Amino acid sequence: MGTNFEIIIASEKDEYHLRILTEWLFESLDRYENNMSLFIEGSDVEYINRFAGQREVRISPEVYEIIKTAKDYSQITGGYFD
């Protein structure tokens, strides 16, 4: 998605639970990357950009909600978070 991030997990849970949490986290990040990347052919966002103004496109409910939330925050803040 064109960004860097760092994840620090601190917990009193045992190693098994931390491993499960970490696997879930990275699977979620992969899913977001695959759905929202500008650079991955076939991602929802790449598809939106490719067909913008040409035809209606179908996207996942998850990506729709993220775009809707971003638009809402843009309107609430007068475009500061555009």
Image (spheres, rainbow, N blue to C red):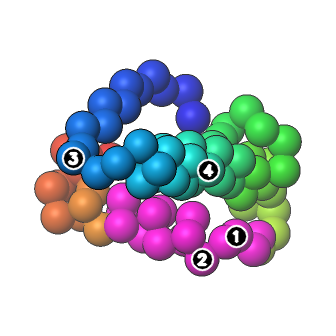
Q: Is residue 4 magenta?
A: no
Mark 1–mark 3 distance (CA, rounded to whole Å): 39 Å
Sequence-wise, the earlier of marks 1 and 3 is 3
Q: Secondary structure at mark 3?
A: loop
Number of the label disc, if any, that sits on residue 12: 3
Q: Which residue is mark 1?
A: 59
25 lies left or right of 40: left
Q: Which residue is mark 2?
A: 61
Which numbered disc, 3 or 2, marks the residue closer to the eye?
3
Sequence-wise, the earlier of marks 4 and 3 is 3
**Where does the magenta region start and end?**
57-71
45 lies left or right of 13: right
Sequence-wise, the earlier of marks 1 and 4 is 4
Mark 1–mark 2 distance (CA, rounded to whole Å): 7 Å
* Amino acid at the residue labelled 2: Pro
Mark 4–mark 3 distance (CA, rounded to whole Å): 22 Å
**Is the residue under label 2 in contact with that under label 1 (CB below 8 Å)?**
no
In percent of width and height, residue 21 lies at 45, 52
Q: Which residue is mark 4?
A: 27
* Amino acid at the residue labelled 1: Ile
* Amino acid at the residue labelled 3: Glu
Sequence-wise, the earlier of marks 3 and 2 is 3
